Image (tube, rainbow, N blue to C red):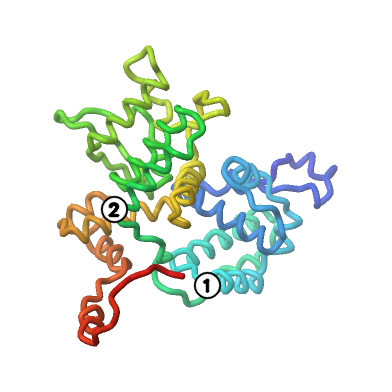
Amino acid sequence: MTNITQQGQASLSVDELTFNFALALPGRASSLHTQRAYFRWVDRYLVDLANLKPLKGAERVQRMHTLPIRILQSVLSATQLRAWLGQLVREGHGKQGVDQARAAIVTLADLLAEAQWLDDYTAAGMARVRTPRAEDGQRQGRWLSLEELRVLMNASKAIATQHTQAVRNEVVTTILCTMALRREELSVAKWGDLSVQNNRAVLRVHGKGRKVAVIDVPRPVLHALDRWRRLIQPNALHPPPESPLVRRIWKGGRIAKSGLSADGIWYIVEQASSHAGLGHVAPHDLRRSVAGALHESGVDIHIISRLLRHSNIAVTERYLSRLPRPNEGAILMSEALGLDQTWHGYD
């Protein structure tokens, strides 16, 4: 699985040999979501252990096509993997994330062993490394109030330097803050995924594990999409079905034909939250906040579960259980003690 032929190997030194992880991985992980996650963890591993420069987006994918074999052989071992996983736990990564990080590196080692660039003993030793104990689930993340969601949505337009960018950003944040899509799901959506079924506008969502769901599109999203469509295709009723729903925008405001990547969606949310003074907010925090706001307002958990497209209600219950829990008892006790209830914010 290297990027050279067998005939050309003899003419290259080991330092020049590369391994095409992006080409080999689909045989082990068919889900595009999982592949992107593995790319992130492998990149992080090489940054931490080989002092490589961290990459994002297309540059990261390109690195996965040309991983230097010499560096891989120097950093892949059971001892180094165990130490790295311990570092992730100390940084606060949850059990789910650490398990995924371990799976990414073990898979890389196994594929290298299959290609005979890593000895079987080393690969087997790495496969026996257990995940260090970490808190269950994902990181706690952020739970934004309804007002904070509104502020972030407005900020996504305020950070734009061109009108086209403002309209595109509005589409992104409106979808994330109402339909609770994952950023990966939004980045792969096509105009052909939009349709009308039984007089209802719906979107076909390509989710995790190759799952596909058809969900209703609220009117505010349709209005935002219509404004965006007029900029993309001013003289036609619909953009081509195979074209990306959200796209990159070049300097000067020209709309690209290529779609906006998941990292691009992350960047919009990150910049908007910073502009709004909300601190660090990730796209998944918006999905979490939608679920939390509906739960707090008394919406039935079955409705929330359908919105999040969870496989069963138990998954939604675990998801909601990670949100901050109300603590009326402590509030009542502080009032009984006559303590000052005025909140002045953090210093």
Based on the displayed image, in which of its 4 quarters is residue 178 positioned?
top left
At mark 2, the secondary structure is helix
Residue positioned 69% across, 60% down in the render = 118
Badge 2: few (under 14), some or many (20 or more) residues near its Cα, within 10 Å? some
Residue positioned 21% across, 61% down in the render = 296
Is label 2 or label 1 in front?
2
Tag 2 residue: 146
Q: Are marks 2 and 1 in contact (CB under 8 Å)?
A: no
Left or right: residue 245 compared with residue 333? right
Left or right: residue 243 compared with residue 298? right
Residue type beneath disc 1: Val
Residue positioned 51% across, 49% down in the render = 36
Residue 277 image point, x, y percent = 45, 54
Residue 270 image point, x, y percent = 48, 49
Residue positioned 42% across, 26% down in the render = 243
Front residue of this view, candidates 160 and 78: 160
**Whether residue 309 is situated above or below residue 206 in the rendered picture:** below
Badge 1: few (under 14), some or many (20 or more) residues near its Cα, within 10 Å? some
Front residue of this view, candidates 237 and 10: 237
Front residue of this view, candidates 81 and 319: 319
Residue 337 image point, x, y percent = 24, 87
Q: CA distance from mark 2 to mark 1?
A: 32 Å
| Number of residue marks | 2
**Whether residue 121 is situated above or below residue 294 in the rendered picture:** below
Tag 1 residue: 89
At mark 1, the secondary structure is helix
Residue type beneath disc 2: Leu
**Whether residue 261 is situated above or below residue 301 in the rendered picture:** above
Left or right: residue 95 compared with residue 225? right
Front residue of this view, candidates 50 and 166: 166
Residue 57 image point, x, y percent = 57, 43
